[in-house]
Image: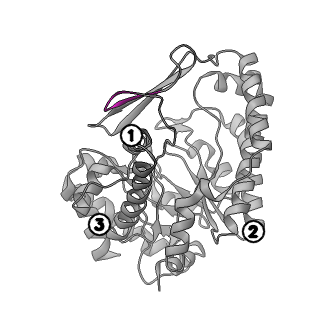
Amino acid sequence: MNSKERIEKTFQGESTDLIPVHHLGFCSQVASALLGREAYVGGGIQQWREVRALWNGPDAHQEFIERSFQDALDIALYSKQDIIRILYWRYPKRPTKKIDELTYLFGDLEEQYSVLQFDPQSEECVISDYGKAKLDTLSELEKKVEEIEERAYNYTPDRQAFDLEIRCQQLMGSTHVVRVDGASISIPLEPTIWLEATLLRPDLVGRFLDAEVLRAQRNILFLSTYGFHIFFGGGDFASNQGPMYSKRVFRQLLLPRLKTIVDYCHTLNGRYLFASDGNLWAVADELFGESGIDGYYEIDRHAGMDLEKIRDRFPYLTLIGNISSQTVHLGSKTDIRIEVLSCIETAKQKQGIIVGSSNYFVPGTPIDHVKEVIETIEKYR
């Protein structure tokens, strides 16, 4: 049984030869240590690398693309994953000025401009906007929604937008599932005017979400022609204390649009996965049941999202993750082994579960801790 067959059997709730594996992502520091070279994967660090490459010219940018592709593939294969994440964070904008090696400027200082600042230790980027109109009032939000609607109406997906995923699909798609996004949907949490609008102008939020639906449908149709049938979507909307907005808002605004995307995905024989960290129990019946989603990832153990409890309550939902990056970062090897083995045991007993980290292996994580995860999975899966 190859990886692709293993994942398909898992979605069908059938037994597999091995427990399937997918880790949400690797920071560059951890992947570099595992591969023995600087690895072009990660979050903000990849944004900075791309901007730096674009500043240095077309050849440098092409080198960035090729290294990013190869390193993402190599770390997925090194960790013996059945689903390959080939695309990490991007920021494909050429800066107008290099302030220093870690700081780049976009735009015109006399008008609207942005500044990207990179922090090597955390591997995070801060991108700050200056001189741009603030989104503080409902009238400003309405204008923004009109712009979003127009862009969505005129949007046509193309090969360039999904080049890395399509290349990986053509290279590895016969044996592995290649992760592809492009069908996310969520209510923006910042600026806070969006949350105010859920109460004062829900029509504006609904129009924004309708635009998200349109883009998602067009992406799903386009990607299905390249053989993709598992779509990673969703969007963060919860903390450890629960959702950032009420159950009523979720039911009235997000749920019907999410169902529209899921139903459309199913008409093309696809499967739709939803991601959000945090405690989602307040809307679990709606999100995991009524919406019709096929899978859930970013399962946040420390926020109370227990793998076995979710499986028992929603037996037809495929689950990905539940190994906490916090445990891998800060716990002992014994803590890590216990957590990994509990996920594997649940997967063996309940089926329909893909084991892996629920979030990035973050900078500062001891490498032997990450190896403990990989080796324990390999030994007992």
Query: Spatial distance from mark 3 to mark 1, Cα to Cα?
Result: 32 Å
Q: Within the image, what quadrant is residue 266 found in?
A: bottom right
Left/right placement of residue 153 relative to residue 352 reads: right
* Residue 258 on image: x %, y %: 71, 49
Magenta region, residue range: 98-105
* In magenta stretch: residue 99: yes
Nearer mark to the viewer, of 3 and 1: 1
Query: Spatial distance from mark 3 to mark 2, Cα to Cα?
Result: 35 Å
Query: Spatial distance from mark 1 to mark 2, Cα to Cα?
Result: 40 Å
Q: Which mark is residue 52?
A: 1
* Residue 246 on image: x %, y %: 65, 33
The residue identified by callout 3 is 374
State the colouring used for the structure image: one colour
Ranked by sequence position, the earlier of labels 1 and 2 is 1
Q: Which mark is residue 110?
A: none
Q: Amino acid at mark 1?
A: Arg
Q: Secondary structure at mark 3?
A: helix
The residue identified by callout 2 is 268
Between 60 and 203, the one lying in front of the other is 60
Q: Quadrant of the C terminus?
A: bottom left
Q: Secondary structure at mark 1?
A: helix
* In magenta stretch: residue 169: no
Q: Within the image, what quadrant is residue 271 found in?
A: bottom right
Residue 199 higher or lower than 263, as above or below: above
* Residue 195 on image: x %, y %: 64, 26
